[in-house]
Image (cartoon, rainbow, N blue to C red):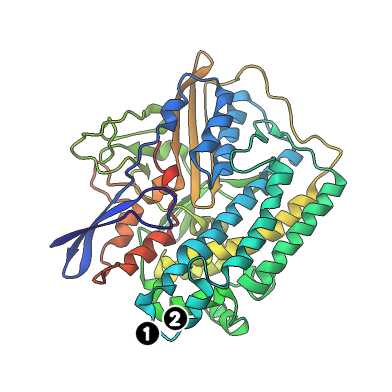
Amino acid sequence: MSRRILGPFNRVEGDLNITLDFTDGKVSAARVTAPLFRGFERILLGREPLDALAIVPRICGICSVSQSVAAANALSALYGISPPANGLHVRNLVHAVENIADHLSHFYLFFMPDFARADYQSRPWHADTLARFQAQRGSSVAPMLEARAILMRFMGSLAGHWPHTLCLQPGGVTKVVSAAERVRLQQWLRTFRRYLEQHTFGLPLEAIAALDSAEALANYRQQAPNADFACFLHIADKLQLHQLGRSYDRFITADAYAAPDGCWSPAGVWQDGSRLPLELDDISEDNHSSWLAGEGSATPLHNDTVPLPDKAEGYSWSKAPRIAGAAAETGALARGLLRGEPLLLALVAEHGGNVLSRVVARLTEVARIVPQMEQWLAALQLDDAFQLATPTQPQHSQAIGLTEAARGMLGHWVALDAGRISRYQIIAPTTWNFSPRDSQGLPGPLEKALEGVEASDPQALHVQHIVRSFDPCQVCTTH
């Protein structure tokens, strides 16, 4: 057996190291290390509950709106208040902008440049991929950044600024949309849609959302061979990416994009081909392999974050979240399965969760959510309230706020004592996906996905494809 440490990984938000044990050229065990302690959960202790709205968005400069949404949901429960319909629609628009921007940044800037590396130069598809996706220089980069900039104008208009906006409140949003502003937002969204249909997909968004099988995906490649998504599918077919990066095939999601008539994406657990309800009491955190005090598992409302950097068993600052004692993957693929999308159900039924299905899930989600944004804009009743006043005192002593970031389920668990925060625990998507082993020796989802992978090349490209298929955000992982 040999051992190799990979890292820090480039094109990853935050620090990440992976220790791999090899036997006969294959990974026999993996240990994923988040080497930076951040301490936000401790920063919040003793503060007024509403202080969380200013502090938790600063956990991350990429998905700060998701942190704000989770905090606002927790505070809504604490104060016993529900946002009006307009507040929910604007919150969803702001949140969707961030998540879509994350998906596009991941695909164009973090994931696809790996296929432009010289390691693949003997492949027939490499020259086109190099020209299109080379880091910083590829022909696809500038159009994407221009389209992303247009989309991000929503943030300036609705959220004031990004990251770390304060427009999201327990009772709704501080922004009131005028008729003229709605027209301007619709124009920006039409421009962004046009970019997606011309460059990313090569077909109308509705045609992408309608793809319902592996055969339909193959037919799409023939219909739009020059689209960026089709280019990825061609590479994925040649490299057999559907055989790479399978984990437990257990997925977890929270409710996402709440509306008066329900959520656009429902909470739940998907395993063994079945959708199960999400039981919050079944969620626990295990500190066994973390550089944190504590052994065994505890629910977030009964867990603490006490650094113990010399802990013998520890190898990461990340905790190990579990659902009913089991590791679970989260992300766009999980959301698609819980929504019952036929294409993703078919891909997972045949080959499980893998590099191909994770990327397909992200991009098809973009094709689905942009039309939904058009509906949220149209649904605004401009003469109605956008925010309700927050009561002066909390109505409850503890609450949970959940949402879906681009990378998956995000949860904030809050407890108060004498009106101040006595416990604030956060489980981020990458905490789920990149968790270390628990007290039962169970590897986290990425650790499991790396087992059995052939990685004899110097840069371990297969390993990097798997890691990036989860789109890690390490700064959100540890608190």
Q: Quadrant of residue 475?
A: top left
Q: Residue at x 72, y 39 (%)?
A: 87
Q: Mark 2: which secondary structure?
A: helix
Which residue is labeled 1 in the image? 122
| Residue 205 appears left or right of 461 | right
| Residue 144 appears left or right of 440 | right
Q: Residue at x 23, y 47 (%)?
A: 441
Please report contact status of discs 2 and 1: CB closer than 8 Å, yes or no.
Answer: yes
Residue 377 in picture, x, y percent from top left: 77, 51
Q: Amino acid at mark 2?
A: His
Residue 368 visible from this viewpoint: no
Please tell me how many numbered marks the rendered image carries. 2
Which residue is labeled 2 in the image? 126
Q: Mark 1: which secondary structure?
A: loop
Nearer to the camera, 121 or 327: 121
Quarter placement of the C terminus: top left
**25 w.r.t. 70: above or below:** below
Nearer to the camera, 7 or 364: 7
Quarter placement of the N terminus: bottom left
Residue 15 in picture, x, y percent from top left: 37, 48
- How far is mark 2 from mark 1, CA to CA? 7 Å
Q: Residue at x 48, y 54 (%)?
A: 331
| Residue 440 appears left or right of 137 | left
Residue sitting farthest toward the left:
1
- Label 1, residues with CA under 10 Å away: few <14, some 14-19, many ≥20: few
Residue 229 in picture, x, y percent from top left: 56, 73
- Label 2, residues with CA under 10 Å away: few <14, some 14-19, many ≥20: some
Residue 110 in picture, x, y percent from top left: 47, 61
Q: Amino acid at mark 1?
A: Ser
Q: Residue at x 55, y 23 (%)?
A: 49
| Residue 279 appears left or right of 381 | left
